[in-house]
Image (spheres, rainbow, N blue to C red):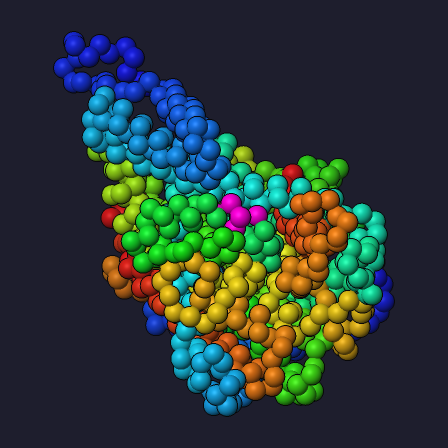
Amino acid sequence: MTTTEVTPTHASLPLTGPRLPQWAPALVGLLAVCAAGLLAMLLGWGIVAFAFLAALLFVVALPLWSVSVEGSRGAVDRLTTSLIWVAFAGAAIPLLWLIWTVLSKGLPAINAAFLTYDMRNVVGDDQGGIYHAIMGTLIITGIAALISVPIGLFCAIYLVEYGKGTRLARWITFLVDVMTGIPSIVAGLFALALFVLIFGPQIRFGFGGSVALSLLMIPVVVRSTEEMLRLVPDDLREASYALGVPKWRTITKVVLPTSLGGIITGVMLAVARVIGETAPLLVIAGKTDSVNLNPFSERMTTLPVYIYYSVTQPGTVPFDAPPGAEAPGIERAWGAALVLIVIVMALNLIARLVGRIFAVKKG
Amino acid sequence: MAKSIDVSDLDIYYGDFLAVQGVNMTIKARSVTAFIGPSGCGKSTVLRSLNRMHEVIPGARVEGKIMVDGQSLYDPSIDPVAVRRQIGMVFQRPNPFPTMSIYDNVLAGNRLNSKRMKKAEQDAIVEKSLRGANLWNEVKDRLNKPGMGLSGGQQQRLCIARAIAVEPQVLLMDEPCSALDPISTSAIEDLIHELKSEFTIVIVTHNMQQAARVSDDTGFFNLKAAGQPGQLVEMNATKKMFSNPDNEATEAYISGRFG
Amino acid sequence: MTTTHETEPEVSPPSQRGDRIFAGLAKSAGLVILAALAAVFIFLAVEGIPGVNQPAETYAPLSSFLPYVGRLLFGTVFAALIALVIAVPFALGIALFISHYAPRVLAAPVAYVVDLLAAVPSVVFGLWGARALAPQLVSVQAWLGEHLGFIPFFAGPASVTGKTVLTAGVVLAIMILPIITAISREIFAQTPRLHEEAALALGATRWEMIRYAVFPYARSGIVSAVMLGLGRALGETMAVALVLSASPVVTLNMISNTNPATIASNIASSFAEATPAKLSVLIATGLVLFAFTFAVNFAARAVVARSERKFSR
Ligand SMILES: Nc1ncnc2c1ncn2[C@@H]1O[C@H](COP(=O)(O)OP(=O)(O)OP(=O)(O)O)[C@@H](O)[C@H]1O
Ligand SMILES: [Mg+2]
């Protein structure tokens, strides 16, 4: 780029080499898409085959062109660059596809009744709703957060402020790592095993689900809080000690407020993670069609479990439905999936917003 | 009611590492004492042991005796938190609390100790401390703005105001001017002169002229040899130290002929 | 916040008492975690160990525990490995894209989108995989069966619903992509600038710089990222349970109608009708899954710890 003034014939050092023009990748990409499109149309291929072929053409053609102009090193660079771009595009497709599917199939299912009815005595394609599942999700996740946040917060405080370098702290760090790897269904089985021992084999209730979710949530809270606390400069702690402030007040009044934004963000992200958990709740919270607001007795449905059962027991397509219509359970499942995704994304966005709001202000 | 400090046979460790060995000195009340010496010789370490900030570092410990006003600082019955309320500290880099306003920063020492005060009383303390730190005129109209919004020199004076707001007996300063421009530096030097009438001040500095300008006594620290612990080489009245020191190494260091 | 109540006269010891209480709280929170993990092991063992020795019909279609859990374990590992093979190249590609290739305006949004992908609940992935992806993969799998049928993986006959272990593997791959991407991206970004610049200053192309400066530095980090992704894939329930109608078989055929079940999906789908005896069997398989994922995660951490030691000095 900086060599425009050097004429290669006169320079003692060759500062320019043969290069493909800047628009070469774009051109090859366009040609690849066109060629693949043409072939796909002629042979009647599906979209997957088309995308695959286009990517393949692009990845092969550009390095071939490059090897004839730029030499083998340049061609390898081109090859890897195009592979990486293709990897990126390839991964973007399923995400967009997923979001589009959920939106297009979920939106028609959603209306005021869908959000405010439960599924009690709903037969066939009667109007059913997910009110009971929304409430179940909020209650179970809320209690899980109530359990996990204090434990996780204090544990992180111990690791960063009190236990630094002790053997106990090393053990806890290690076990938090282990906890991060617990498969979610195992957490559910644990809660089941625990409460079955206490209350007998038929026990299913919302609180058990909260316990299982806490097991999954605590390590996330510990990790993110720990990271945030470590970001607080020691300067501030020392400034506070030097004013004769006891350690615990230093922590509550200086360290925690300074890292508050990051801690809240971490907690919300942890909530967003467990709110979509299905397996543990399937096992311990069970499934019901009616609204149950008491986490300490009776089964309680959450949105993910609702989706699971709607898919596995979708009911039959009504005989008077237009051709191509899906079973009522599937339609409700898409609607519930959309609601769930909206909740999770909203939590994510709020988490980041809150992080920004509570971030330390300068000036 | 400023206090004097007597240090005898002080050894300071970081874990197994002996950082400073055999310090004996007396720091006079209502005077300014400067610590000078090459980097890494343990000036900060000694300073931090004077208000038990040293033990904040995991594994750090102290042997020997420090007497403040007839009480042994490292006696088991002494509460280190209470010590730090009596012996305040200003750090090398300004470190106002980022979540607090200027006003709250000045009151931090009182607030964080949950001392209950009337609003008027609080206002009085804030004004007195900020005036004491020569900052009042610059910030009196924006007391509720974040302390981080000030310039570096102003932040440092805010930290001094914060330290004197709890009315300590002794004020320790670890290179308080090293991050500041000459004008802020001279403002703080003036301030030290004024504070001397009320507080006992100990200041660490790498700036010989500063030590000569502000201090009454000067202690010169040096490593015994490379890889050996630091020690107090000489401590004398500043005038004598800078004109006719007892020790050759001191003279070499002060006149800049130091290896 | 400070009112003028004349309470609690100022004495110095309370500071220490407050400290002791607070430190105690913090420490007990740490101990709760120890206790919780011990409890997980104990309760799973108490409820699960009887499951190892139940009447033969409980293990239908097999007759004892070891073959039963063995086949499930095979299915678990098989599906997870398919997911890894698909996900790892993409994940590393995206990570490199974000850290070294993307134009600056693109890098941050892409990283953000990948994080969002991680937030999509697994049941939604399962729903999408079963209802949207599987039908699209039918023709692909038919093609694979026709043209690559000589490879045992594609022996066929291809399923007409698309609900195969290959589809499940693809869904799992999309689910573990974000975690592998996130970790390797951090590691790539941490490559010492000096190494990179040294390579570039010697006239390396961008790819050569990555090969000689970035990869050697990041190798162990990549290994651990992949292992963590593997751990996630092993334990994933919903995506598999919704996509597959599975039976405990051992087969390498990825595109046929008979598919191996995984431990987690088997628990989810047999759980509802389980007798107490069957329940203890399921809990026992859960314990096996826990032990297995634990071993994988542990190996990953060990790799990271070793490399951290190598790079810290
Ligand atoms: N936190 C610590 N842990 C271990 N050793 C330390 C620590 N802080 C300082 N030291 C060591 O103690 C010795 C004295 O350090 P100190 O910071 O007191 O020097 P100093 O005289 O203040 O230097 P400077 O002028 O650079 O500030 C040095 O050898 C240093 O390496
Ligand atoms: Mg120092």
Q: Residue at x 61, y 41 (%)?
A: A100
Is C271 colored magenta in this rendering?
A: no
Instruction: Depth check: give the residue in front, B42 or C258.
Output: C258
Residue C17 quadrant: bottom right
Q: Residue at x 46, y 33 (%)?
A: A44
Which quadrant, please, contains the N terminus of chain C? Answer: bottom right
Q: Is residue B115 above or below residue B62?
A: above
Where is residue A65? Give x, y as percent. Answer: 27, 24
Residue A291 quadrant: bottom right
Where is residue C67? Give x, y as percent. Answer: 40, 80
Q: Is residue A24 above or below residue A170?
A: above
Which quadrant, please, contains the C terminus of chain C? Answer: bottom left
Where is residue A1? Give x, y as percent. Answer: 32, 19
B181 on left or right of A250 = left
A130 on left or right of C65 = right
Magenta-colored span = C132-137
Farthest residue, direction left? A12
Q: Residue at x 80, y 53 (%)?
A: A114
Is residue C233 at least partly visible in the picture? yes
Instruction: Depth check: give the residue in front, A339 or C205.
Output: A339
Q: Residue at x 38, y 38 (%)?
A: A84
Q: Main secondary structure of the magenta part?
A: helix
